[in-house]
Each structure stands twice: as structure tokens, then as C-alpha cells.
Amino acid sequence: MTNDSVPNGSGRCFYTVSEVCKMLQVERKTVYRLIDRGLLKTSKAIRHKRISARSWDEFINTSGNGGAQ
């Protein structure tokens, strides 16, 4: 079974930029803009950017309802 998106609650701690691109159906530069704006937080522990599952959940929960908190 092929899955192009990573399901919420999959038990993962981090997602790659490419995975987030697929889940949002946007280009890489859009994900990097979200990171630069602070809407997605990345790990600082490794060289490659990884978006934390917690940051992903917060982004989806706030952007899914028009940004209302």
C-alpha cells in the first residue's frame, strides 16, 4: 500500500520538508517560507531541517480554522 501523505497520529516525531510538501501539496519554497515565518518549527539538532510532529499538529489546528486560536 502506497501512502503519499503521512497520517496524523502515526507515532512519528519529525517530518522532512519533502513530506510536508506532499502533505500540504505545495512547493518546497512555500514550506521554507512557513519555516521562516515561524509557522513551522524545525529541529536544530541535526543538519537537515526536520519539522516536529508537534509543530505540524499546531500548524494544522490553527490554519484549519482560519488561524483562530
Image (cartoon, grey):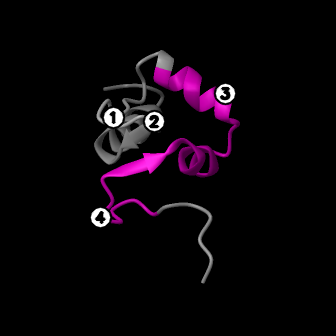
Which mark, by number, is residue 49? 2
Cα gap from disc 2 to disc 1, whole angstroms? 6 Å
Which residue is painted at 42% across and 41% down in the image?
50
Mark 3 nearby-residue class (10 Å; few <14, some 14–19, many ≥20) = few
Along the horizontal axis of the image, is 44 left or right of 7?
left
Q: Is residue 53 above or below residue 67?
A: below
Q: Look at the numbered disc 1 and give the secondary structure of its residue.
A: loop
Kind of residue at disc 1? Ser
- Between the residue at mark 4 and the residue at mark 2, the CA separation in whole angstroms equals 19 Å
Q: Secondary structure at mark 4?
A: loop
Q: Amino acid at mark 3?
A: Lys
How far is the residue under mark 4 from the one under mark 1? 17 Å
Q: Residue furthest right?
A: 27
What's the residue at 42%, 24% (across, down)? 39
Label 2 crowding class (10 Å Cα cut-off): few <14, some 14-19, many 20+?
A: some
Q: CA distance from mark 3 to mark 2?
A: 13 Å
Mark earlier in primary sequence (1, 3): 3
Q: Are marks 2 and 1 in contact (CB under 8 Å)?
A: yes
Query: Splitting the image into 4 quarters, where does residue 12 fall?
Result: bottom left
Q: Which residues are magenta?
A: 7-35
Give the labeled residue for mark 1.
43
Q: Any mark on residue 6, and which?
A: none
Location of the N terminus by quadrant is bottom right
| In the image: residue 51, left or right of residue 34 | left
Residue at the spot 42% in from the left edge and 34% down from the top edge: 47
Q: Which residue is mark 3?
A: 29
Label located before the other in sequence (4 or 3) = 4
- In this rendering, the label closer to the viewer, 1 or 3: 1
Residue type at numbered disc 4:
Gly
Q: Is residue 53 above or below residue 10?
A: above
